[in-house]
Image: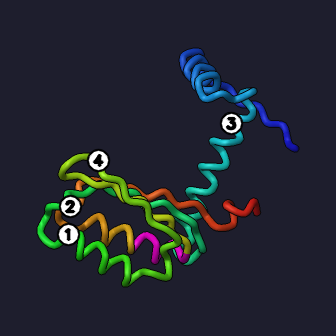
Amino acid sequence: MHRITISLDGPLADAFDALTQREGYASRSEAVRDLVRAAVDARTVAATEQGECVANLSYVYDHHARALVTRLLDIGHAHHGLIVSTTHVHLDHDGCLESMMLRGPASEVRALADCVRAERGVRFAMINLISAAASIGA
């Protein structure tokens, strides 16, 4: 384990301490380690589009939008090799939430997310990618 020292101005240090306590970290060091891991992983995935990743694609859509459900199913079948599982939740009379667990090359996972996001009737879509190396502790 390497020791590093950082300096923060008062208001930032106070805000960080509040975040550390609110999220249940045992120490500032644990919180900083999580932030550093997330930053390194985000840059690793961004830098290597061909790198393997695991991801969660979540999107909210209007199931009444013309032929949207069929188009989303077609997109899923076209990318079946990336999809590990899908969860569907009814939000209200019109809205649905789907969450896909994905695994594969980051470029292909991003392309799938872009296809879903671009469909008319998809109100919101967000993807969270994690490098496969990070997900197995490498």
Q: Position of residue 136 (x, y in %)?
A: 72, 63
Badge 3 is on which residue? 32
Q: Which residue is mark 4?
A: 91
Left or right side of 73 for 52: right
Q: CA distance from mark 2 to mark 1?
A: 7 Å
SS state under label 2: loop
Residue under numbered circle 2: 63
Residue 22 tag number: none
Q: Amino acid at mark 2?
A: His
Quarter of the view holding residue 123: bottom left
Q: In terms of secondary structure, what is the magenta stretch mainly?
A: helix
Between the residue at mark 2 and the residue at mark 4, the CA separation in whole angstroms equals 11 Å
Give the mark nearer the N terminus: 3 vs 2.
3
Which amino acid, mark 4? Leu
Q: CA distance from mark 3 to mark 2?
A: 41 Å
Observer-side mark, 4 or 3, equals 4
